[in-house]
Amino acid sequence: MSDVQLFSEEASAEVVAASFRHTPDPRLERVLTSLVHHLHAFVKDVELTQQEWESAVDFLTRTGHTSNEVRQEFILLSDVLGVSMLVETINHRTGGAATESTVLGPFHMVESPARALGDDIALDGKGTPCLVSGRVTGPDGEPLAGASVDVWQANEDGFYDVQQPTVQPAGNLRGLFRTDQDGRFWFRSVVPRYYPIPDDGPVGELLTATGRHPNRPAHLHFIVAAEGHRPVTTHVFVADSPYLDSDAVFGVKGSLVREVPEVDDPARAAEAGLPNPFRTLTVDVTLLRTVEEPS
C-alpha cells in the first residue's frame, strides 16, 4: 500500500494519468494523459467552485440535447472557442506554398449540383450580381485541368438555401464546377452577406455572457480538389464586409480576404451575361501535391 500513490490535490493529474498506463492504443493514452494534465491544471488555476462545476455540467448537457440530425451544437461550441480552426490549421499546414484552409461550416451539401462553367448559381435572381473567376494550379504554377471546384454561399439576406427550404430554390447559390484545360473556372453569382451563427442555444448564451456577437463576415465557401494533389477546404472573404476582425468562429486568415470591385462596363457585362454594373471576385487556388515527385 505504501508504494501506491493515492489521490490528492497536489498529485491529482499524475494519479489519474497513471490509470491509463495499460491503454492498448499508444495515441489514445497520450491524448488522455495530456488532457488530464491540462484539465486538472485548469481546475487548480481558477480554483473551480462546486457551483461553477455544476453549471458547466448543465451547460454541456444542454449542448448535447440541442444537437440533432441537422444541428451539432458541440461543433458550434468548438467553433466559437477557436478549437475547430486550430485543428484545421494544424492538420493542413502548407508552409506558405498553397492556399490556406479554413473550417467547412455546417451548410455544405455532400453532392452539390453540377454546373457548367459560366452558369449562374443565383437561381432566385436576387442580390448584387458578381462574376467569380479563378485558376487552380499546382505548387509550381502548373494549371490543373479538370479540377473540381465545389462552391456554396449565403444569399443577400445571410441565409443558405437549406435554412430557407420554402423561400430559396433547392441548390440556390451552390454548384460543382470543373476547370478547363488552363485550370480556369468562372461562374455568375451574387455578393454574399455577413450572417449570424445559430445563437438560440447554449453556445449563444455563452456568447452573450462574454459580450461577443454571433456574426461571421461575408464569404464564399470552396472545396477544390485535383488528382494527385491535396484538396483544400477554404473560404474567400469579402474585403469590405463587417466582422472581418471579429469572426465568431475565427475563420478569417489574411490571405483569404479579397477585394470585390465594381465594374461599370456594358460590353463586359453583356459578355459575362450580367447586368451592368456588376462586381468581380478573383479566386486563384494553389494545391500541394499529395506525393512529391522525385528530384
Image (cartoon, rainbow, N blue to C red):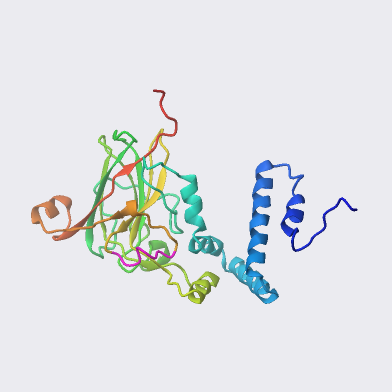
Q: Is residue 135 above or below residue 64?
A: above
Quadrant housing the C terminus: top left
Q: Is residue 130 left or right of residue 25?
A: left
| In the foreground, 24 or 62 | 24
Q: Is residue 56 magenta?
A: no
| Residue 159 placement (x, y as % from top left) | 37, 66
Q: Which residues are magenta?
A: 241-248
Which residue lies at the image location 45% right of the left edge and 50% below the top edge? Answer: 110
Please count the marks in the image. 0
| In the foreground, 44 or 17 | 44
Where residue 269 sits, quadrant-wise, is bottom left
Q: Is residue 36 left or right of residue 86?
A: right
Q: Residue furthest top?
A: 295
| In the foreground, 186 or 44 | 44
Q: Residue furthest right?
A: 1
| Residue 184 placement (x, y as % from top left) | 26, 41
Where residue 231 sits, quadrant-wise, is top left
| Residue 78 placement (x, y as % from top left) | 53, 60
Where residue 134 sits, quadrant-wise, is top left
Q: Is residue 32 left or right of residue 5?
A: left
Dominant secondary structure (helix, strand or loop) of the stretch shown in magenta: loop
| Residue 40 placement (x, y as % from top left) | 68, 61
